Image (cartoon, helix red, strand yellow):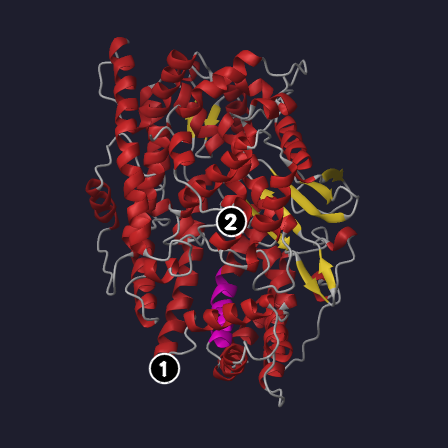
Amino acid sequence: MKNSLLMLISALLIAFTGCKSGQKTTLDANNPFFGEYTTPFEVPPFDKIDTSHYLPAFIEGIKQHDAEIAAIIDNTEAPTFENTILAFDKSGKLLSRVSKVFFNVNEAHTNDQMQEIAKKVSPILSKHNDDISMNARLFERIKAVYDKRSETNLDAQQIRAVEKYYRDFERQGANLSKEDQDQLRKINEELSMLAIHFGDNMLAETNKNFQLVIDNTADLDGLPEGVISAAAETAKAAGMDGKWVFTLSKPSMIPFLQYAKNRALREKIYRGYFMRGNNNNANDNKKIVADMVRLRAEKAALLGFNNYAAYTIDENMAKTTQTVDDFLNKLMVAALPLAKKELLEMQQIADKEGAGFKLDSWDWWFYAEKLRKMKYDLDENELKPYFSLTNVRDGMFAVAGKLYGITFNKVTNLPVYQQDVETFEVKEADGTHLGILYLDYYPRDTKGGGAWCTDFRASGWENGKKVDPVISIVCNFTPPTGDMPALLNWDETTTLFHEFGHALHGLFTQGKYTRTAGNVPQDYVELPSQVMENWAGEPEVLRMYAKHYKTGEVIPDALITKIQNSGLFNQGFDNVEYIAASILDMDYHKLSAPADVTDVVAFEKSAMDKIGLIPEILPRYRSTYFSHIFDGGYAAGYYVYLWAAVLDADAFDYFKQSGDIFNPELANSFRKNCLSECGDDEGMVQYKKFRGQEPSLEPLMKKRGLK
């Protein structure tokens, strides 16, 4: 550990624990991170973890990790797989343990103290990671093993781990000059802090800085009763009993946009949404975006790449920015005319009703609902009673059971970080313990927006024994109101299936090495999640779980037919807004250094004008709230959802062609090659082991009505 880092850590200890300079510190026996978890299944002891425990655990974790690295580089024996690669692969256990808990909870259930700790610890972690990746002696040992990897009787997975680590060190600056390494360190630290600030601003702009407060019942005209009740409960919780409050969380905003007849209020809430981070206030993200784009371009140049997109995509299945550009442009050419047709159909409805205005972006959801009703005789409110959260959850569990034989048993003796979180033990068909699954469903002021899947402990291998995973799914779904349970719309239903697909990937992962187990290219990551969405809407599956929350009646065949017939509804909009955001992401990250974006809003407009985006559709994420790319790890990678959609459509088509969507042979092959052993080789190699050939674009084009 370098002296400068020691000084920084000492200063932080004084600030957070009150230790005076010169005092000897010992590990706090009451800190749950400083010992093995004694909880059932060794899950994190959330009931014992206090905010004050995090920083000392981070500091001790770094100290222990540094000692482990020192032991590797000070080893006088010749570098081998065991004393170098394996030792490195298994290092940093405490640091990993506290990081997984802290950052996951900070995203799902944060507080002011945790946000401050994140700001304190992020530069420390950035420096720690750089100290490792730019450690010349460590890289020298790794390179020695790499150079002789084919001569030392290593098996295929050992060789893969060696190659992955060698490539990691190259990409993180191990071969740079001391001067360039110092510059890279500075860039990495700045980027880590900017990402934290971006996320904090987003949280404030979404959960704190906007409310649509209604006190006139006339302004509720058109809204379903369940939506009104939820708004009343939100108002009551905010101390505004007798009023109705709508927020920018999707379960609150989207129904308002779909059904509220008051156009001015639809504009107000949607403008509140799409202006997040762009209000010239303390939470403005424009300068952060510009700074991050500039720094990423500088980082790419230091590492020998033309731009940050080239740096990122070099590790992906796509390999080149040109491949991604061609892919996105081909799909935009197919999707944009469809979106324009949808707009024309909606404008005709508005004109027929005598609306007297040209539709704008805040009108799309409202008139799309009218179009859905007109074309398919389908009102989403007809569906929701059949999609209670409990039924959807049990349905996805049943699908996994039929595919893979696994079971999910609710357990109530596990500590949780928030009282609404549910926990399940997952078992193999023979009763063997497979892992633990946490489910966190509803919005709250302390939670980030969207839905995601993560882990508190990844599947792994330690001391010759498999380590079972602890997986977490976090969502922002419509909460229950009064005596009505949480009823999901179709998007929320497929979202739960989607995140569950990620969870299955984490639960099934096999592999002895941390670096390769379950580790796949970024544009493969969404295959396990998106493929699960396909099962959600199959008639056979709907009859398994779509049951009326009051009567238990199975969803009628007539409604199933409507769901099937409306499968291509609004696909022009859905595809165009997604592709537009993906292109915006690419345009930012294809800038070469110096990437001087003086006006983020103007840059975004230029990028969207270039592709002919119609003003009635905004990119799914505008620059100032594009969390995926500015604080979510998808920089130059938002395209990956669509790339993986090619794989998932092709994979599910394979099941359909077999005549059995639960084909056990295909399910076993998909689990083995695409989930369990997916890190054993390159993404396309693993997919072809399952599919027998490269994926076709045709199933996706057909599924989305683009052909």
Q: Which residue lies most toward the bottom here?
A: 76
Q: Residue 44 in the image: state x and y as whole percent.
A: 70, 54
Q: Residue 400 in the image: state x and y as whole percent.
A: 65, 37
- When the figure is inspected, residue 26 is found, relative to residue 475, above or below; the finding is below
User: Does the magenta-highlighted stretch encompass residue 130?
Assistant: yes
Which of the pair 278/346 is nearer the observer?
Answer: 346
User: Does the magenta-highlighted stretch encompass residue 637?
Assistant: no
| Left-right relation of 326 to 24 | left
Magenta stretch: give its range.
119-133
Q: Amino acid at mark 1?
A: Ser
- Camera-nearest label, 1 or 2: 2
**Is there CB contact under 8 Å for labels 1 and 2?**
no
Q: Residue 394 in the image: state x and y as whole percent.
A: 67, 30
**Mark number for residue 3?**
none
Q: Earlier in the sequence, mark 1 or mark 2?
A: 1
Query: Dividing the image into 4 quarters, which one contains the N terminus?
Result: bottom right
Q: Quadrant of residue 680?
A: bottom right
Query: Dividing the image into 4 quarters, which one contains the C terminus?
Result: top left
Instruction: Tell me the residue at 60%/59% (across/down).
Output: 517
Query: Circle 2 is placed at which residue position?
Result: 687
Instruction: Tell me the residue at 31%/58% (across/down).
Output: 293
**Mark number for residue 177?**
1
Q: Using a 10 Å C-alpha cutoff, classify the residue at mark 1 as few (fewer than 14 neighbours), some (14 to 19) or many (20 or more).
A: few
Question: Can you see residue 83?
Answer: yes
Q: Amino acid at mark 2?
A: Tyr
Q: Quadrant of residue 260?
A: top left
Instruction: Tell me the residue at 51%/26% (across/down).
Output: 490
Q: Residue 405 in the image: state x and y as whole percent.
A: 71, 39
